[in-house]
Image (tube, helix red, strand yellow):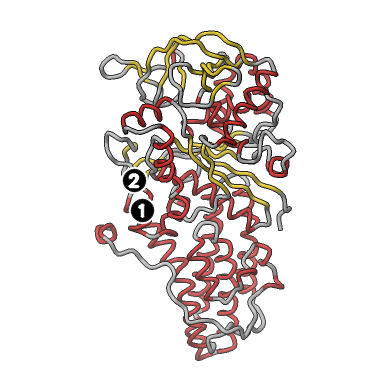
């Protein structure tokens, strides 16, 4: 078993001005899968998500809604909280940046940066995007179709002039580069690491970190005319969640620094440049890793409000099933890359891999056990080379999955698991236990025992991605709830011959909707 130690993984907190779509679900689902894997592997896990509720966009949206910002956030934040039961997320907490404890944490890190000599008062004049909540230099802007200035992400920008506190980011170039170079996997994928290092090496400008033109935010300590730049506020949630500013709190000592900040590639700069500098300035350790995943397109087109092609997660779950949605999102593309969501691709994955490969393997093996072995775990005889080889492959897949999950390569972990699913199906066909029933019943029992034991391994290892379906498989193998962690994947925990088994039921049915008919 892996060494039992703490593991802290976070999603970005989601902006309440948005509506939940598969991009939000994707990030949190990845963290959920990794968290479940680590817990099953004996780790003490903290998995946090939440909502970012301050900023000019929220204030304007609340005004347009005819309500005050807090009431607006109370209502809209619930949409993101509802993602957890919808997609069976196992997060340990949900933080809101309008909580009093978060205000305390934000003001504490501000004071820490000020005490470090990195904050000064001046005035800001430059381009700002309300939608991106980001400042941009002139050379970063693009020309819009009507000659207007746009951010690199296509958002409108406006010229802003106002008094502002600044963070001396320009003084942090060498220390940030040393931070990145201290661990080759500090930022993943490596293409994103190279992108960040190139940005920092190109030279850093001091960063405006307060606003005076609106009031919906955390007040700057000692100067209520200013509120904090939303990215100082939002990023600090990772500290708030573990008890900061009480650095003697057990949760802080256990989980900080965070093991992984999981983010979308569009907000990598905030997490990999600004945030480590803020932390180190305040005398705090930066995160061990930042992983930036890619974007989903929908049927080949980028998700956008103008196209109206955002896909609400509840629609996917309702149409295809919970585990099927979880499996597709984690399996379809190399984690870290961009990828395309299409309904046909969902159907292909769920029918080919979940229904035909994994689900059918369990159903036909357990049906043969039920029919031919008195509905009980068979009594095996001597093992052949083929038997031992399949069992060995099932036992070895955990280490392969650990190596992949340690680098957030969820697709590789699933590929390793499904390689054994494929081996097991080929073993069934080669051994033909239905024929052995007539010619060699003892050999049939051995083959079915080996298969049942391999299915036990597969179901335990599949729990992080398809927890409901894997749990039902383990129920049908009469595996006790306290025998479903990775610690149970040992020879002394193998299925006990003679254990009564319930009548098997299909776990991953085929989808036969319109997309299947068109295939």
Question: Is residue 302 depicted above or below 207 in this figure?
Answer: below
Residue 166 picture location, percent across and down: 57, 14
> Helix or strand or loop: what does disc 2 sit on?
loop
Closest to the observer, 222 or 133: 222
Question: Is residue 191 depicted above or below 209 in this figure?
Answer: below
Closest to the observer, 12 or 60: 60
As drawn, is 208 to the left or to the right of 399? left
Tell me where residue 2 sits by quadrant.
Answer: bottom right
Residue 474 picture location, percent across and down: 55, 71
As drawn, is 5 to the left or to the right of 319? right
User: Which of the numbered marks, if any, corresponds to residue 311?
Assistant: 2
- C-alpha distance separating marks 1 and 2: 8 Å
Closest to the observer, 362 or 264: 264
Residue 111 picture location, percent across and down: 65, 22
Q: Residues within 10 Å of mark 2 (few under 14, many from 20)?
A: some
Residue to which mark 1 is pinned? 316
Q: Earlier in the sequence, mark 1 or mark 2?
A: 2
Question: Is residue 136 depicted above or below 179 in this figure?
Answer: above
Closest to the observer, 19 or 220: 220
Q: Residues within 10 Å of mark 1 (few under 14, many from 20)?
A: some
Tell me where residue 515 sits by quadrant.
Answer: bottom left
């Amino acid at each position: 078993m892996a060494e039992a130690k703490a593991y802290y993984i976070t999603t970005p907190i989601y902006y309440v001005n948005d509506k939940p779509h598969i991009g939000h679900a994707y990030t949190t689902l990845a963290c959920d899968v990794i968290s479940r894997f680590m817990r099953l592997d004996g780790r003490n896990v903290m998995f946090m998500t939440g909502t970012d509720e301050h900023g000019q966009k929220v204030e304007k949206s609340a005004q347009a809604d005819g309500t005050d910002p807090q009431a607006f956030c109370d209502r809209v934040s619930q949409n993101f909280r509802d993602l957890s039961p919808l997609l069976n997320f196992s997060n340990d907490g949900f933080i809101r940046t309008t909580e009093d404890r978060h205000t305390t944490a934000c003001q504490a890190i501000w004071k820490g940066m000020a005490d470090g000599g990195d904050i000064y008062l001046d005035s800001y004049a430059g381009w700002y995007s309300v939608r991106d909540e980001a400042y941009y230099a002139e050379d970063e802007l693009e020309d819009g179709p009507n000659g207007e200035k746009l951010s690199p992400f296509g958002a409108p920008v406006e010229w802003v002039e106002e008094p502002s506190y600044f963070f001396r980011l320009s003084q942090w170039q060498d220390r940030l580069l040393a931070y990145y170079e201290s661990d080759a996997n500090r930022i993943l994928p490596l293409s994103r690491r190279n992108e960040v290092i190139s940005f920092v090496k190109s030279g850093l400008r001091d960063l405006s970190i307060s606003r005076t033109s609106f009031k919906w935010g955390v007040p700057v300590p000692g100067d209520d005319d200013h509120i904090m730049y939303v990215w100082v506020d939002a990023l600090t949630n990772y500290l708030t969640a573990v008890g900061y500013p009480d650095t003697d709190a057990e949760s802080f000592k256990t989980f900080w620094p965070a093991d992984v900040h999981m983010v979308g590639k569009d907000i990598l700069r905030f997490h990999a440049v600004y945030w480590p500098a803020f932390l180190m300035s305040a005398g705090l350790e930066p995160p061990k890793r930042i992983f930036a995943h890619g974007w989903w397109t929908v049927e080949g087109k980028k998700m956008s409000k103008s196209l109206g092609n955002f896909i609400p997660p509840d629609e996917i779950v309702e149409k295809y099933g919970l585990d099927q949605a979880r499996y597709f999102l984690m399996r379809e593309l190399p984690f870290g890359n961009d990828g395309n969501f299409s309904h046909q691709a969902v159907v292909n994955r769920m029918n080919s891999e979940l229904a035909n490969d994994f689900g059918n393997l369990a159903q036909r093996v357990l049906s043969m056990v039920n029919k031919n072995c008195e509905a009980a775990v068979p009594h095996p005889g001597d093992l052949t080379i083929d038997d031992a080889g399949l069992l060995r492959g099932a036992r070895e897949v955990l280490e392969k999955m650990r190596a992949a999950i340690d680098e957030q390569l969820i697709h590789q972990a699933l590929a390793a698991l499904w390689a054994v699913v494929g081996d097991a199906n080929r073993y069934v066909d080669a051994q033909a236990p239905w024929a052995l029933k007539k010619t060699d019943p003892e050999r049939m029992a051995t083959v079915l025992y080996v298969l049942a034991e391999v299915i036990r391994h597969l179901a335990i290892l599949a729990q992080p991605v398809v927890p409901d379906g894997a749990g039902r498989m383990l129920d049908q193998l009469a595996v006790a709830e306290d025998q479903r962690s990775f610690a149970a994947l040992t020879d002394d925990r193998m299925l006990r011959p003679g254990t009564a088994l319930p009548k098997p039921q299909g776990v991953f049915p085929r989808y036969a909707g319109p997309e299947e008919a068109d295939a």
